[in-house]
Amino acid sequence: MILVVVVALAALSVPICGGSLGRLSRLRLKAIWAILVALVIQVVIISVIPKEMSGWPGQGLELVSYGLAVTFLIANVRVPWLWFVGLGGLSNLVAIGANNGVMPASRAALLAAGRPVHRGQFMNSTTLRDPHLAFLGDVFSVPRNWPFANVFSIGDIVLVVGATLLLHSVCRTWPARLAHERAAPPVTGRTATTSPT
C-alpha cells in the first residue's frame, strides 16, 4: 500500500513541475495483460484468500506474479526509465526466489511498523529462521504511528525512484527537460570562413 501512495504522490508532482499527465496516454505499452494478471494474483494471495494461500500455493503464485511483471518489463524495454523500475522488481524477485517465495523481513522493521511477526496464513513478507540475501528483504519501515505504516525493501525504493523518473520523463516536466538538455551532446557545426580578398 505504501508503494501505491508514494507513486501517487510522484504523479501529483508532475503538474507541479510543469508536466502533463495526459502524455501518459500516448504510451503504447505492450503485454499489459501480464502486469494486470500479476496485480490480480497479488491482491488474491494477500487480501482475498490469504489463509488458503499458506504454504507452497501462495509462494508459487507469488513467483508467477513476479515472472509476469518481468515479462511486461521486457516487452516495454524502450519506455524511458522502465529498466530502472525493473531493477527494483528484480531485486525483490531475487530475494523472494532465494527464500522459497517469501520476502524475508527484519523482525525489528516489522515491530517498528506494528506489523505481525508471525501469522497463520500466507505472508508475502515475514521473518524467516535462516533467510538468504536478507539485505534485499524488507529491512526498512514506516513507523507504526505514521500513516500507511509498513515495511519495505531496497528494491521497493528503486521501484519508486524509477517510477518517479519515468513519470517525469514521459510527462516532460521541467526537471526532466533540463536533465535531458544537459545530457545531450553539444551541437557542433561547421564555422563558415571567408577567404581574404
Image (cartoon, grey):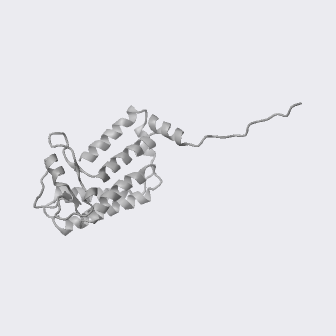
Along the viewing direction, whichever of 6 and 71 lies nearer the viewer: 6
* Res 96 → quadrant: bottom left
Residue 162, image x and y in percent?
Answer: 38, 48
Mark count: 0
Residue placed farthest to the bottom in the image?
56
In the figure, residue 164 lies in which quadrant? Answer: top left
Q: Residue 191: in sight, yes or no? A: yes
Residue 134, compared with residue 152, is above or below; it is: below
**Residue at 18%, 43% in the rendered image:** 143
Q: Residue furthest right?
A: 197
Q: Residue at x 46, y 39 (%)?
A: 176
Give 50 or 32, whichever is nearer the viewer.
50
Q: Position of residue 111 (x, y in %)?
A: 13, 49
Residue 148 location (% of width, % of height): 20, 43
Task: Looking at the picture, tell me which residue is in the foreground, 65 or 83.
Answer: 83
Residue furthest top in the image: 197
In which quadrant is the C terminus drawn? Answer: top right
Choose top left, top right, bottom left or bottom right for residue 75: bottom left
Question: Is residue 173 in sight in this rendering?
Answer: no
Q: Residue drawn at (32%, 56%), measured in percent from left and top?
A: 36
From the viewer's perspective, tell me whether residue 77 is left or right of residue 160: right
* Left or right position of 129 against 21: left
Residue 128: x and y in percent read: 17, 62
What's the residue at 31%, 48% (across, down)?
157
**Front residue of this view, candidates 75 and 85:** 85
